[in-house]
């Protein structure tokens, strides 16, 4: 990019440039907060800029060179976001990793990226890095944030982050000009971050995103929802996920709003209530979990309170979304809703931490329409977006007043979308990734010469609304033996609406009928078991209980009734199912770190269960390898019951297959 191009843009062309701008324009506004030892600590934009510069100088002092990769592993903390910005200031590329990744996963990313520096949150992350260092020989420096437990380690190539900053401040006069020169060299085409995909079908790929990708996406989407420096977000999503990067780095530095970091995953809900963010994102499982907890609490409430809750929620679900969208509502309904707001909706939103939300989004997986409507009925402006790592998140998003449960919105500003004859969705935008690191073949197969990217998802534009509707992953969409459409994710989301069902995997491609493997939600079902005096010693024992099977069967059959009314997908009803003896777990390779099901792994690992679901068996004996918290492997054995479910008459097969 030449000087004329830079001038034409009229704004900084890098994240460090945006931080410097905010330090001038928003000097006294809060930029970051972190809760530690129960107390919220705050840094203004001016203070944060000084902390970041000291860290950048310290990294420079340790020998960080332009083009180096800096891995960052830990929970959401201001210091970890500062580490990524400091690396960029030095001309290096930050590579955030999932802090719950096992050593083997971490070894691949560290080795593939060739990271020279690693920033670790605590002793646990340092230990994992030291364990895999033989597979990642490029690592030269380890910087740790938390000093606890680190006193007796070999510090010849290891430093506390605070000490690196102290050395940086001392080196300002000596290294300041060099750092300034590196910052000045950054432009729109400089690499901003490298994020690894979740790897549902193989090894994770390193998605290279430029400053252009992140800043243009942040600018367009902030304008779309009028995000500004007065907004607040809670940064609790994994720092290795592109969503956290665009919300807590891209949009935060563009708009200048405040990033709040909870004390830990365990205190996240408490911290959410204390902060009361105005801008909030959560994957469906967070909203599902909160709704499950609400329903559990209501089951424990007195009869009158239970009746009042369900009565007023009926009012909310009937008129709440209309009021939220500014549509006309009768006086009687307005008064009833106002009463509900005082007695139920307001206190409930406050308990959830959603009292101040102005803009809320969900994405990652499809959310059940009933769950989506529940939150909107409370007056929460919850919307859906559709995105990918390769798009810097945003492909579509829902505008205010145009929110629907069964679509994912209109193209985000600057995004073009086309639907191929096969039904696959393609897009191109300023956020389109640069390349897959060290993988030219995958880059070429995903992004063509004109910049169009294959999403791998099947979808279509809804004629009535003009919004995009995603059916399923294109590779997962198939046909039943009779020619009717098979879309497993659609059915799985129907099942996961029920609080008792945590996860479901639907089978049926090329088969005569659909079957399902189901995970119960231990929290919800365990609470029900306690209320009904049902004793159990383990997840496996509770999952196999006859009354649990009866409850799951009722849910499956209710889902079948819902599926039957869809002429395209009525053939996807569940005829047989079983309740799995273990939870699907990322540590066992059955899910990604973002909790997406790895269908190929499950098909291979539970092949005996799939066979039994289709051969008429009423029970199946199985043995499964599991990974314990300390990394040891073990085997669990179980005899699982296979249950039949009632199928409802649906649209004719010929109609569904057209």
Image: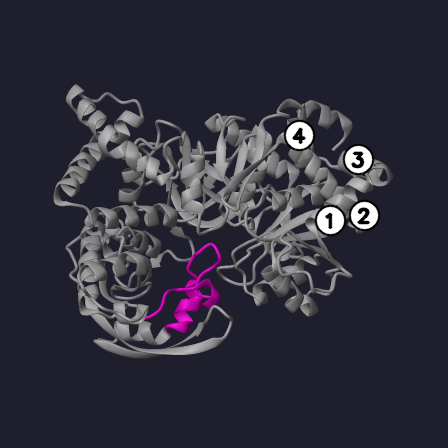
Query: On the image, numbered disc 3 is attached to which residue?
Result: 180
Question: Where, by quadrant of the figure, is residue 528 drawn?
Answer: bottom left
Q: Residue at x 79, y 51 (%)?
A: 62
Question: In this orientation, which residue lies closer to the viewer: 322 or 525?
Answer: 525
Mark 1, residues whose alpha carbon is within 10 Å: few (<14), some, or many (≥20)? Answer: some
- Looking at the image, residue 292 sits to the left or right of residue 387; the answer is left
Q: Residue at x 42, y 72 (%)?
A: 604
Residue 449: x percent and y percent? 62, 44
* Nearer mark to the viewer, of 1 and 2: 1
* Main SS of residues in magenta: loop
Residue 643: x percent and y percent? 20, 69
Q: CA distance from mark 3 to mark 4?
A: 17 Å
Question: In this orientation, which residue lies closer to the viewer: 342 or 492?
Answer: 342
Task: Give the answer, above or below, for where 553 lies relative to 166.
Answer: below
Is there any visible trace of residue 453 in the rendered image? no
Is there any visible trace of residue 117 in the rendered image? yes
Which of pointers 3 and 4 lies earlier in the amino acid sequence?
4
Query: On the image, numbered disc 1 is attached to which residue?
Result: 163
Give the structural element (helix, strand or loop) at label 1.
Answer: helix
Question: In this orientation, which residue lies closer to the viewer: 183 or 388?
Answer: 183
Q: Which residues are magenta?
A: 581-606
Residue 31: x percent and y percent? 58, 33
Query: On the image, numbered disc 2 is attached to which residue?
Result: 61
Query: On the image, numbered disc 4 is attached to which residue?
Result: 46
Which of pointers 1 and 2 lies earlier in the amino acid sequence?
2
Q: Residue at x 46, y 28 (%)?
A: 225
Which of pointers 1 and 3 lies earlier in the amino acid sequence?
1
């Amino acid at each position: 990019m030449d000087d004329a191009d830079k001038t034409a843009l009229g704004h900084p062309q890098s994240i460090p440039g945006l931080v410097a701008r905010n330090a001038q324009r928003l000097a006294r506004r809060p930029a970051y907060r972190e809760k530690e030892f129960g107390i919220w600590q705050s840094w203004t934009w001016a203070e944060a800029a000084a902390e970041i510069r000291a860290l950048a100088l310290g990294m420079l002092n340790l020998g960080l060179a332009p083009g180096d990769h800096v891995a960052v592993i830990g929970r959401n903390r201001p210091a970890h976001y500062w580490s990524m910005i400091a690396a960029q200031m030095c001309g290096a590329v930050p590579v955030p990793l999932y802090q719950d990744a096992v050593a083997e996963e971490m070894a691949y990313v560290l080795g593939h990226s060739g990271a020279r520096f690693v920033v670790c949150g605590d002793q646990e992350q340092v230990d994992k890095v030291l364990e895999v260092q033989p597979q990642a020989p490029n690592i030269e420096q380890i910087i740790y944030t938390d000093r606890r437990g680190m006193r007796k380690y070999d510090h010849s190539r290891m430093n506390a982050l605070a000490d690196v900053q102290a050395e940086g401040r001392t080196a300002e006069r000596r290294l300041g000009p060099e750092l300034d020169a590196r910052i000045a060299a950054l432009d729109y085409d400089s690499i901003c971050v490298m994020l690894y995909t979740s790897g549902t079908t193989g090894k994770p790929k390193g998605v290279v995103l430029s400053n252009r990708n992140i800043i243009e996406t942040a600018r367009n989407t902030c304008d779309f929802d009028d995000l500004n420096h007065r907004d607040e977000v809670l940064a609790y999503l994994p720092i290795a996920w592109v969503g956290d990067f665009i919300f807590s780095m891209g949009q935060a530095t563009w708009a200048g709003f405040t990033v709040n970091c909870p004390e830990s995953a365990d205190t996240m809900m408490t911290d959410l209530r204390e902060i009361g963010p105005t801008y909030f994102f959560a994957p469906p499982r967070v909203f599902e979990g909160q709704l499950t907890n609400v329903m559990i609490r209501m089951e424990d409430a007195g009869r009158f309170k239970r009746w009042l809750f369900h009565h007023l929620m009926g009012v909310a679900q009937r008129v709440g979304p209309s009021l939220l969208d500014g549509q006309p509502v009768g006086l009687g309904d307005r008064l009833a809703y106002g009463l509900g707001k005082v007695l139920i909706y307001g206190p409930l939103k406050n308990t959830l931490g959603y009292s101040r939300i102005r803009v809320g989004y969900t994405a990652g997986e499809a959310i059940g329409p009933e769950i989506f409507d529940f939150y909107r009925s409370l007056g929460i402006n919850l919307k859906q977006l559709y995105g990918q790592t390769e798009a810097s998140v945003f492909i579509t998003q829902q505008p205010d007043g145009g929110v629907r449960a069964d679509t994912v919105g209109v193209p985000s500003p600057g995004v073009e979308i086309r639907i191929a004859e096969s039904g696959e969705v393609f897009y191109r935008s300023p956020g389109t990734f640069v390349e897959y690191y060290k993988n030219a073949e995958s880059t070429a197969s995903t992004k063509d010469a004109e910049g169009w990217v294959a999403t791998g998802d099947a979808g279509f534009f809804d004629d009535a609304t003009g919004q995009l509707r995603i059916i399923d992953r294109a590779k997962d969409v198939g046909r039943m033996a009779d020619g009717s459409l098979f879309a497993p994710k659609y059915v799985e989301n129907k099942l996961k609406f029920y609080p008792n069902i945590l996860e479901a995997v639907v089978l049926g491609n090329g088969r005569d009928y659909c079957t399902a493997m189901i995970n119960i939600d231990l929290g919800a079902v365990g609470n029900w078991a306690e209320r009904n005096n049902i004793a159990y010693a383990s997840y496996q024992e509770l999952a196999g209980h006859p009354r649990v099977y009866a409850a799951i069967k009722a849910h499956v059959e209710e889902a079948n009734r819902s599926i039957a009314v869809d002429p395209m997908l009525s053939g996807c009803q569940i005829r047989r199912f079983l309740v799995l003896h273990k939870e699907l777990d990322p540590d066992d390779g059955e899910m990604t770190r973002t909790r997406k099901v790895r269908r190929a792994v499950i098909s291979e690992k539970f092949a005996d269960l799939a066979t039994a679901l289709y051969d008429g068996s009423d029970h199946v004996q199985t043995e499964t390898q599991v990974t314990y918290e300390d990394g040891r492997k073990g085997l669990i054995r179980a005899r699982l019951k296979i249950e039949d479910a009632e199928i409802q008459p649906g649209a004719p097969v010929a109609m569904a297959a057209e």
